[in-house]
Image (cartoon, rainbow, N blue to C red):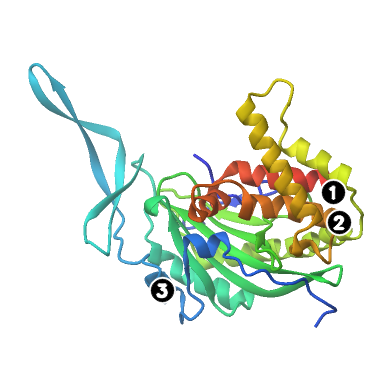
């Protein structure tokens, strides 16, 4: 199963002990992936109110015995699964029971409300004004919450990048409870969840039978995440101070999306040409590039803007879901970043 796209490099994993700057780029008002898939909760007084506004309370997540029905010419036999159970929840809108996932019997069940104290502590200790977005994905199997930190970076003195903490959890056993630092470029609503080799950008707590997500666990690791912001700003400054030519940008595109035009099927070649055209337009003409055009930072933003806002998708919600959960999107952003920082 794909995991939430926090940077993988140098992630710290741990178990619970209790188990005006100069000028800015023109702001293009777009919905971020968080806004598209979740609920904006900036007016909520605390985490519990925010989760309630987003429909994440009252789920009563619980384990249910897993039984299969074997139908043979001799009749129907009920067969219990001794190794796994179903996780189900109550849909607060309908009061009906909904399936979440199948997990091992030792899986540690947590309610969404169990996150409230941790989220409120993160808000208080980080200096955030409150939670920004709360939502769920995959019919409730995954949840997220974001908060905007007071840190605002001015890359090269001109390009504003805000820093968010994004908190993810799952109810299908696919991921741990995870807190990630996510830089967010305001000019184009690009989410830059990138790994930097020398720093840690996310921490997590595994779900086990005895584990509990505690305030102390998260507080102890927060400083590791904050160091990431300093390193990210340093890397971004180097990128904005270094030029990139159009042929070099084309080479980045061909490396991130390799297609052999001599052997690829016609449909693949046509899709590749449309993608190249869109990426080149973002690189040469997009208003979001006005103050940074011709730099390696602009090359990274063109690739990220394409993935976040222009890549083909049946609906914006489908694209946003892909941005938040798709390993391919994360890998391509990271590959472009690695190529540009060489």
Position above or below: 121 against 319: below
Task: Find residue 228 and name its label.
Answer: none
User: Label 2 near label 3: C-beta < 8 Å?
Assistant: no
Image location of residue 298, percent across then percent down: 81, 56
User: Label 2 near label 1: C-beta < 8 Å?
Assistant: yes
Query: Disc 3 vs disc 1: which is toward the camera?
Result: 1
Along the viewing direction, whichever of 66 and 189 lies nearer the viewer: 189
Report the residue at 29% width, 41% height from top: 85
Left or right for 144, reference 5: left
**Residue 121, quarter of the rendered image:** bottom right
> What residue would you read off at disc 1?
341
Q: SS for tag 3?
A: helix
Along the viewing direction, whichever of 109 and 192 lies nearer the viewer: 192
Image location of residue 98, percent across then percent down: 27, 51
Alpha carbon of mark 3 to alpha carbon of mark 2: how far? 40 Å
Alpha carbon of mark 1 to alpha carbon of mark 2: how far? 7 Å
Along the viewing direction, whichever of 30 and 129 lies nearer the viewer: 30
Q: Residues within 10 Å of mark 2 (few under 14, many from 20)?
A: many
> What residue would you read off at disc 2?
239
**Which mark is first along the chain, 1 or 3?**
3
Q: SS for tag 2?
A: helix
């Amino acid at each position: 199963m794909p995991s939430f796209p926090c940077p993988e490099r140098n992630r710290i994993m741990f178990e619970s002990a209790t188990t005006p700057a100069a000028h800015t780029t023109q702001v293009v008002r777009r919905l971020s992936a968080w806004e598209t898939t979740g609920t904006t909760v900036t007016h909520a007084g605390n985490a519990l109110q925010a989760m309630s506004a987003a429909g994440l309370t009252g789920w009563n997540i619980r384990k249910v015995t897993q039984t299969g029905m074997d139908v043979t010419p001799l009749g129907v036999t009920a067969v219990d699964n001794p190794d796994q159970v179903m996780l189900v929840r109550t849909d607060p809108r309908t009061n009906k029971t909904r399936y979440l996932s199948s997990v091992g019997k030792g899986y540690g069940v947590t309610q969404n409300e169990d996150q409230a104290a941790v989220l409120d502590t993160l808000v208080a200790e980080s200096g955030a004004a409150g939670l920004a977005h709360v939502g769920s994905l995959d019919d409730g199997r995954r949840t997220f919450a974001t908060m905007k930190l007071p840190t605002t970076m001015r890359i090269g003195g001109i390009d504003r990048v805000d820093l968010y903490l994004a908190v993810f959890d799952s109810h299908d056993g696919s991921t741990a409870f995870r807190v990630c630092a996510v830089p967010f470029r305001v000019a184009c609503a690009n989410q830059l969840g990138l790994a930097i080799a020398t720093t840690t950008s996310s921490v997590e707590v595994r779900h086990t039978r005895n584990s509990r997500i505690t305030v102390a666990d998260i507080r102890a690791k927060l400083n590791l995440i904050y160091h990431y912001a300093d390193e990210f700003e340093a890397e971004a400054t180097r990128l904005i101070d270094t030029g990139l030519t159009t042929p070099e940008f084309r080479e980045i595109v061909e490396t991130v999306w390799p297609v052999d035009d001599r052997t690829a099927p016609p449909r693949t070649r046509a899709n590749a040409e449309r993608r190249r055209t869109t990426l080149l337009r973002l690189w040469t003409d997009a208003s979001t590039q006005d103050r940074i055009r011709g730099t390696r930072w602009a090359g990274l933003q063109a690739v990220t803007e394409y993935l976040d806002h222009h890549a083909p998708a049946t609906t914006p919600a489908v694209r946003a879901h892909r941005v938040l959960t798709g390993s391919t999107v994360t890998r391509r952003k990271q590959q472009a970043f690695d190529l540009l920082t060489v």
